Amino acid sequence: MMLSISPEVRAALDAGQPVVALETTIVSHGMPWPDNIETALAVEAVVREGGAVPASIAVLEGAVRVGLDRADLEHLAKAEGVAKLSRADLAWAVATGRPGATTVAATMIVAARAGIGVFATGGIGGVHRGAELSFDISADLTELARTPVTVVAAGAKALLDLPKTLEMLETLGVPVVCYGTDQFPAFWSRESGLKAPIRLDDVGAIAAFIHAREALALGGGMLVANPVPAADEIRASEIGAHIEAAHADSVAAGITGKAVTPYLLDAILRRTGGRSLATNIALIRNNARVAAEIAGALARA
C-alpha cells in the first residue's frame, strides 16, 4: 500500500517514539459541525499530552494519508460526500480520488502498514440487532482477527447486539481486555451486564500481553475496552429506552448498511437533548489518553 506519512509521524516512527492512530469517520459521519472538528483537535491534543504523536488517517486526493493537519481535518468535517471507508472500499477511494474517512477496520489496515500498533477510537462496530436476518455484522470484528493493532475503545457501540458481538470476538480469537473493570463497557454506559473476558488494571500489563502475543506469533489485534469516566456516563437503564426508539425509527425509515450507525447516533443525540454527544466526546478523549499510555509502555519495553 502506498502511504503518504506526515513528516512528524515519520520522524516519530523512525525514532521509536509512541504513535497513536486515529480514525476520521468520527469527523465526517459521527458528529455535527463544529463538534466534529473541535473533538478531532482535542483528541489529538490529548494524545500529545500523553507523550505520543497523533496520526489521524484518511484518503485525500487519491492518497492514503497518515497524519493530518488542521486544514485536512476541517475539510473532512465540512465536505459533502465523504465516503465511509472500510476494507472493501479503501482501494476504491484511492483509485477514484474520492475523499474518504476511515472506519475502525480501514484505520487498522493503514496503521499496521505504517507500523503503528495502537489506535484510539470511540467504540467499535459489531453484530447489529437482527443480524440473524440481515447478516449485518461490522467488518471491524474480522479486522481485529487479522490485523495486528491494539484498539482502545469504550467497548462496542451500545446500539449493537453486545452479547453476540462478544461471542463473535471470542470465536474469531480476538482478546478483549476490560481495563480496570469486571464488566464489558457499553459505550455511553460503564456497565453492560456482560462479564469481562479478561481484566487488566495497568498499561504495563497490557503492553506485556501484547508482546507475549507477538512472541507467540498469534496474529491479529486486541480490543482494550476502556469504560467512559463515571462523571460522564449515561446509565444503561436510561440510554436503553432511547436506543430502542431509535432502532424502531430506523426500521420504519428503511435504513440499512453503512447508514445505520450514523442514523442511530443522530436519533439518540436528539432524544437525549445532546447528552449522548457530550458523553461520546468524553469517552473518545479518555480512550486517547489510555492509548497514548499504552503506546508509551510499548515503546519503553
Image (cartoon, rainbow, N blue to C red):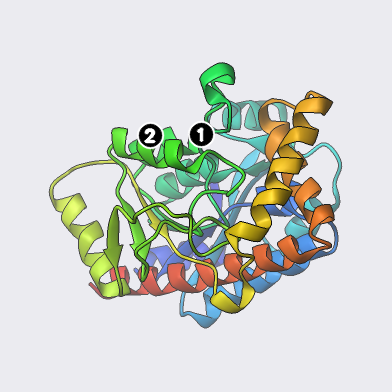
User: Residue at (76%, 66%) from the top-left corner?
Assistant: 275
Question: Is 55 positioned to the left or the right of 14 in the image?
Answer: right
State which quadrant residue 133 falls in: top right
Residue 128 visible in the picture = yes
User: Residue at (36%, 74%) from the top-left corner?
Assistant: 296
User: Residue at (59%, 58%) from the top-left corner?
Assistant: 236
x and y percentages locating residue 245 in the rendered image: 75, 42
- Tell me the distance, in whole angstroms, between the alpha carbons under discs 2 and 1: 8 Å
Question: Is 263 positioned to the left or the right of 6 in the image?
Answer: right
Up-down relation of residue 97 to residue 109 (above or below): above
Q: Which one is in front, 193 or 175?
A: 193
Up-down relation of residue 85 to residue 40 (above or below): above
x and y percentages locating residue 270 in the rendered image: 84, 54
Q: Quadrant of the C terminus?
A: bottom left
x and y percentages locating residue 103 in the rendered image: 59, 43
Mark identifier at residue 127 = 1
Please state which amino acid type lies under the numbered disc 2.
Answer: Met
Question: Is 105 positioned to the left or the right of 173 in the image?
Answer: right
Q: Secondary structure at mark 2?
A: helix
Please state which amino acid type lies under the numbered disc 1.
Answer: Val
Mark identifier at residue 6 = none
In the rendered structure, are the residues bearing label 2 and label 1 in contact, judged by CB atoms less than 8 Å apart? Answer: yes
x and y percentages locating residue 45 in the rendered image: 61, 76
Going from N to C along the chain, the mark reached first, 2 or 1, is: 1
Q: Secondary structure at mark 1?
A: loop
Say how many tags the image has: 2
Q: Which one is in front, 230 or 52?
A: 230
User: Residue at (54%, 68%) from the top-left corner?
Assistant: 228
Q: Residue under label 2, please give it.
A: 168
